[in-house]
Amino acid sequence: MRKFNPKLSEYEIKYLLEGSSEKELKNTKVHATVKNLVALAYPTEETKFDKIWKYFYLPMKRSGKLISVPFFIMLYKKDFYVSFRFMGNLKITQGKDEIAKEYASMFKEAKRFLVFAKTINSFIIEKSVPYDFRIGKIKGKYIMKRIVSLHDKIRLLGLYETRVRADSIITQVSLNDYLSVTALCYRAVYPLAKKLSPLEMYKKWADGRHGGMIDIKDTKSEREFSKWRDSGRWMGAHPFEIIFSWHEHGIHLYPPSKENHYYALRVTNYAYVHEFILMVKAMIKNNIPFRAEELYGVLEYASGEKELNVNKDYPHGFQYIPSKKHKERYFKHIQWEKLKGPTLKSTG
């Protein structure tokens, strides 16, 4: 059987792309090379503004063996935008910049590989794309260390729905009222919280950008708290992010208002789902009027029933590493996305 021998290595490609940021090449020769490549296939998507060609593959050597990496090309206002999966991106325009000849070689190699795959069969694509360059789905229960049992999930949902049906309302709170509820949440999560005052807890675990909230002078006044909130001068700050997260946001606790007559508990970073669940339980136990609209999705995630992306959406997804451990433990549970090829134009 004929073999395909790539001219470039994975190391060389990574060097040319320099990570995930977009690198611009102003070179007419490379632009023409990309144009010749896309001329072989029909666009996968097309609007009056742009054209997109998916399912191209760039061949390269890894440890002396053939691998290929998926990439797509978009044409927008006569410029090409090329994205190589997990490797980097290029913007290619016409120009006279002097660049490494390997950039043109990349697209010549992709064209040569495309013709080769068509001549042999598409199986070579399936065989050559490594699993660390593929995407798929896996249920959380196969990778998570902590799982909420089905019994606990059903029980908590029942308690929460009972709490919501009670429909007790509250329209105004003071700063002291708000901090006392945050204290319930902190005590449910952190053992150290028992030794701290509500304000000390807030200063320790909240975002810190309180927007003037803890500067309210009359901490017992509902009017003062409402006046501060309605002023909007805290906009842009994070006074209600009671657990801070460096990635996205952590956990928010919003106080009641004229529009919403209850506290609202929300979580953004799912690294904090178990803290979120403990807070929900504490608020139910203490009969706090509140809503946690994300609880259903959180429990699906925490019980391991939610499908997580593989090699996508880090850190919420799962990164598959081509190792013996991952192959034995996780591979059989992953539903890999089917690899496709471009729709080629007839050459006859």
Image (cartoon, helix red, strand yellow):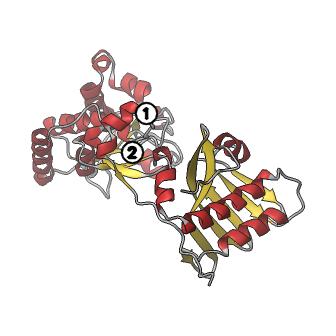
Is 295 displayed left or right of 109 in the figure? left
- Up/down of 34 relative to 143, above or below: below
Using the image as rendered, state which of residue 19 and residue 277 is in the foreground.
Answer: 19
- How crowded is the residue under tag 2: few (<14 C-alpha within 10 Å), some, or many (20+)? some
Give how far across and how far down residue 162 sits, in percent.
9, 49
Residue found farthest to the top: 195
Residue found farthest to the front: 1
- How crowded is the residue under tag 1: few (<14 C-alpha within 10 Å), some, or many (20+)? few
Using the image as rendered, state which of residue 222 and residue 282 is in the foreground.
Answer: 282
Secondary element at image label 2: loop
Q: Quadrant of residue 330?
A: top left
Give how far across and how far down residue 215 sits, in percent.
48, 33
Using the image as rendered, state which of residue 278 and residue 288 is in the foreground.
Answer: 278
Q: Quadrant of residue 174?
A: top left
Give how far across and how far down residue 228 sits, in percent.
45, 45
Residue highlighted by disc 1: 323
- Up/down of 98 relative to 222, above or below: below
Q: Which mark is residue 230?
A: none
Give the residue displayed 27% in from the left and 49% down from the top: 306
Give the residue displayed 48% in from the left and 44% down from the top: 132
Name the quarter where the C terminus is drawn: bottom right
Using the image as rendered, state which of residue 120 and residue 345 is in the foreground.
Answer: 120
**Camera-side mark, 2 or 1:** 1
User: At label 2, which amino acid type do we have?
Assistant: Thr
Residue highlighted by disc 2: 268
Q: Quadrant of residue 57?
A: bottom right
User: At label 1, which amino acid type do we have?
Assistant: Ser
Is 110 displayed left or right of 265 in the figure? right
Give the Cα separation between the discs numbered 2 and 1: 31 Å
